[in-house]
Amino acid sequence: MSAAPVNVEQLLLADDGLIPNNAALPLLVYRRAVAVAGIDTEATIIAGLAANGWGGAWVDGIYPFHHYHARSHEVLVFARGDADVQLGGPSGPVLRLAAGDAVLIPAGVGHCRIDASADLSVVGAYPAGQEDWDLKRASAADRALALTEIPSVARPPRDPIRGGGPPWP
């Protein structure tokens, strides 16, 4: 994709009663993971993700409500701007993420945009075979179904940012 990440943080987020999160896989935060300069930043990020086996890419922002995906892992790469993103549900940590940062969100882990700059642009993508993502909200009904789906989500064979082997052992 670009230069190797300067720092990769791991956050293992517990089930909060409505959002299941993922007890087996930590959320990964890649700080300064990609170069973000020029008018083709989003296209360059999409090409880098595709080279690492991640597809179904889109360019947009992040929903301003707590949600998660139970049938796919998701990577969010910040192409422009910055945002405060709450992870794991309403009582989870809030991280400031900026252009060049990326977040690998395991299936079941909640995320919500709390605040963002006007120029926020995020590229999202999914491992091959998981591009048909679902959208679940913080509710008992969604959680009950998600708990049956999350365990069957395959781990991706390649790290979306670093390439090479899988992001999790």
Image: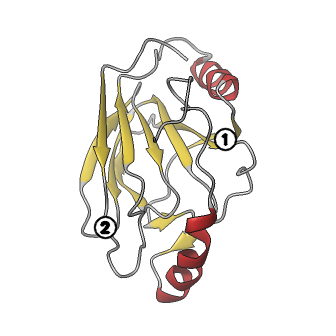
Using residue 35 as the reference point, say whether residue 157 is left or right of it: right
Q: If the image is split into quadrants, where does the C terminus sit?
A: top left
Mark 1 to mark 2: distance in Å? 28 Å
In the current view of this chain or complex, which residue is farthest to the front?
Answer: 169
When the figure is inspected, residue 70 is found, relative to residue 73, above or below; the finding is: below
Q: Nearer the viewer, residue 23 or 144?
A: 23
Disc 2: which residue: 14
When the figure is inspected, residue 32 is found, relative to residue 93, above or below; the finding is: above
Q: Residue at x 49, y 34 (%)?
A: 77
Q: Residue at x 62, y 16 (%)?
A: 40
Q: Residue at x 57, y 51 (%)?
A: 73
Q: Residues within 10 Å of mark 1 (few under 14, many from 20)?
A: some
Give the colour scheme of this rendering. Answer: secondary structure
| SS under mark 1 | strand
Q: Nearer the viewer, residue 7 or 139?
A: 7
Q: Which mark, residue 58?
A: 1
Q: Which percent across, then down, holds residue 7?
A: 29, 26
**Disc 1 or disc 2, which is closer to the eye?**
2
Residue 137 seen: yes
Q: Amino acid at mark 2?
A: Ala
When the figure is inspected, residue 38 is found, relative to residue 21, above or below; the finding is: above
Q: Which percent across, then down, holds residue 2?
A: 50, 13
Q: Nearer the viewer, residue 144 or 42?
A: 144
| SS under mark 2 | loop
In the current view of this chain or complex, which residue is farthest to the bottom?
Answer: 141
